């Protein structure tokens, strides 16, 4: 444990804004203390091979162009254009001479605390290339430039200020590109159902440490098991079990980073029945074990 602390302190002294660890094609990104965001400026020609990470990646090209390869799709992002890449998407990029860019990396979890963003989460899980010069495009570009300015100044609560801009950005994205989807879902789901599912989400947030079952939530809402399951998936984009597991993983991540509690304690306090089930769920969600996550990100 002492060795891990020393290694973390050494890394932070060498890399003020965090560091990157690449294992095969898996990249682990760390952040400044008490933050979930980092921003890089570069005007140096470079190439980054195919990789993936849990962070959202946003490119804002300032001069010249940057080329991205995402699956079978190629993108050339010219000056003023923006490319938004969701988490866990395999991608590579290169930037040539006489070009410059800002690269934003951040964890999605803080944004998913916003219920309406979480509801449309699966629809945000795609690449957005903003290049039409629309009002939305220009407003998002201004927001990202403001994030960069706040990030550089590092005043009190700068991370929260940056995320307030990111919430605004996702709101604009949703209104511009997802409004048809949202209206469709609204017509399919009666208002009373939406209110009941919102209450069920609050129940999960408060009782995740307990052995919460689908039957418990169905009883809580007064719906049948089948109707509740279908309505919950329709309105949140997640199954009940998937939502509960993600909530528990979010709690576990904080415990791993902020405390030196044992894996058994972390598993218990985040609502998992055993260390084995905790390890299995964590690996599925974060593509690494809890021990690896703590070794890379932890303060302890």
Image (cartoon, rainbow, N blue to C red):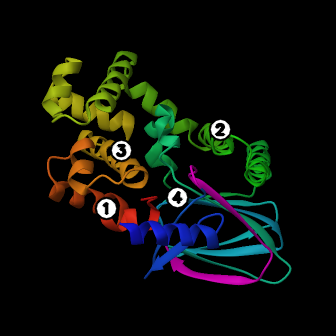
Query: Residue at left 52%, top 58%?
Result: 86
The residues colored magenta run 33-51
Sequence order check, earlier mark of 1 and 4 = 4
Label 3 sits on a secondary structure element that is helix
Q: Nearer the viewer, mark 4 or mark 3?
A: 3
Left or right of residue 202, residue 207 in this image: left
Residue position for label 1: 290
The answer to whether residue 48 is above or below residue 152 is below
Decide whether the magenta segment is chiefly helix, strand or loop. Answer: strand
Q: Nearer the viewer, mark 4 or mark 2?
A: 2
Q: Is residue 38 magenta?
A: yes
Left or right of residue 4, residue 61 in this image: right
> Which is nearer the eye, 10 or 117?
10
Residue extending farthest to the front is 2
Q: Is residue 275 magenta?
A: no
Q: How far apart are labels 1 and 3 at the CA level?
A: 12 Å
Kindly indicate whether the residue at mark 3 contacts the one at mark 4 (C-beta within 8 angstroms). Answer: no
Residue position for label 3: 251
Residue position for label 2: 164
Q: Which numbered disc covers residue 86?
A: 4
Query: Residue at left 64%, top 63%?
Result: 17
Label 1 neighbourhood size at 10 Å, few (<14), some (14-19), many (20+)? many
């Amino acid at each position: 444990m002492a060795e891990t602390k020393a290694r973390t302190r050494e890394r932070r002294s060498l890399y003020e804004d965090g560091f990157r660890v690449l294992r095969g094609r898996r990249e682990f990104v760390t952040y400044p203390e008490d933050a979930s965001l980092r921003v890089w400026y570069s005007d140096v020609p470079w190439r980054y091979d195919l990789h993936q990470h849990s962070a959202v990646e946003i490119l804002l090209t300032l001069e010249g162009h940057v080329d991205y390869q995402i699956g079978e799709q190629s993108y050339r992002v010219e000056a003023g254009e923006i490319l938004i890449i969701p988490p866990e998407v395999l991608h590579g990029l290169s930037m040539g001479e006489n070009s410059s860019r800002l690269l934003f990396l951040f964890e999605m979890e803080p944004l998913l605390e916003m219920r309406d963003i979480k509801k449309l989460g699966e629809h945000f899980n795609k690449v957005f290339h903003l290049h039409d010069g629309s009002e939305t495009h220009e407003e998002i570009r201004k927001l990202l430039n403001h994030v960069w300015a706040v990030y550089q100044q590092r005043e009190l609560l700068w991370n929260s200020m940056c995320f307030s801009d990111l919430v605004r950005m996702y709101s604009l994205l949703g209104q511009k590109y997802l409004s048809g989807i949202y209206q469709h879902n609204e017509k399919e789901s009666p208002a009373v159902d939406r209110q009941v599912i919102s209450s069920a989400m609050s129940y999960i947030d408060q009782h995740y440490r307990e052995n919460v079952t689908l039957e418990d939530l169905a009883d809580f809402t007064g719906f049948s098991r089948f109707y509740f399951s279908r309505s919950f998936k329709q309105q949140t984009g997640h199954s009940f079990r998937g939502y509960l597991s993600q909530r528990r993983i979010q709690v576990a991540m904080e415990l791993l980073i902020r405390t030196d509690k044992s894996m058994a304690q972390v598993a218990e306090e985040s609502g998992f029945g055993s260390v084995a089930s905790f390890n299995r769920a964590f690996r599925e969600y974060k593509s690494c074990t809890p021990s690896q996550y703590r070794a890379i990100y932890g303060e302890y």
